[in-house]
Amino acid sequence: MEKLQAEFERVRAAIAEAEEVLNHRVIGLEQHLEALDEQDAPAVAETSGLAAAEAPVEEPVPMAGPRRKVACCEEGVPVEVLGSDYRRIMVAFDEAGGGALTARQTAVALGWDSSVPSRGEGARGRLKRLARRGWPVEDRPGRFTLRVPGPAAAAA
């Protein structure tokens, strides 16, 4: 019986380790796919069929770039410079009516299964990135509120 119990504990530990590796890989894959999506967006505009001389000249909108680069929250910087997930998070702040958001609430706002640990961590990472750039603030550990009430209104 002791041998079975020891084998059971070994298998349980191996499964827990494998789940942790899987969660990290899922997060990495999400980051990679989002970066690819943001890189492909300018390529679609370039292949629209217009020659360079015929293309209308427009002033470029500053983009945040790949997922890990989040634009700083400065006067006059619209929410539209953020990536799609970050814009949805800002809309969730707006819908919360000035209330605080947690990682779990953010995962739900992003349409993710909040019971999956990797999804909660992905949402937490996005909130932390936004906070480092001045969009929301982390007033208490794990609870984020908007620094300035106005930025999310521009996304709606």
Image (cartoon, rainbow, N blue to C red):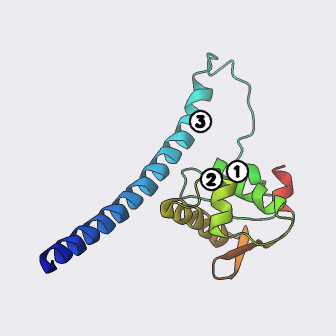
The kind of residue tagged 2 is Ala
Q: In the picture provided, is 2 more to the left or to the right than 62?
A: left
Query: What residue does disc 2 label?
Result: 64
The kind of residue tagged 3 is Ala
Query: What residue does disc 1 label?
Result: 81
Quadrant of the rendered image containing residue 4: bottom left
Q: Which of marks 1 and 2 is nearer the N terminus?
A: 2
Identity of the residue furthest to the left in this view: 3
Q: Do the residues labelled 1 and 3 touch (CB within 8 Å)?
A: no
Mark 1–mark 3 Cα distance, whole angstroms, equals 13 Å
Residue 140: x and y in percent read 69, 83
Quadrant of the rendered image containing residue 94: bottom right
Q: In the picture provided, is 79 more to the left or to the right than 130?
A: right
Query: What residue does disc 3 label?
Result: 41
Residue in view at x 64 percent, y 52 percent: 85
Quadrant of the rendered image containing residue 96: bottom right
Q: Are marks 1 and 2 in contact (CB under 8 Å)?
A: yes
Residue 154 appears in the figure = yes
- Picture layout, residue 5 above or below residue 74: below
Residue 114: x and y in percent read 59, 60
- Dot 2: element: loop
Observer-nearest residue: 123 or 136? 123
The kind of residue tagged 1 is Val
Residue in view at x 56 percent, y 66 percent: 125
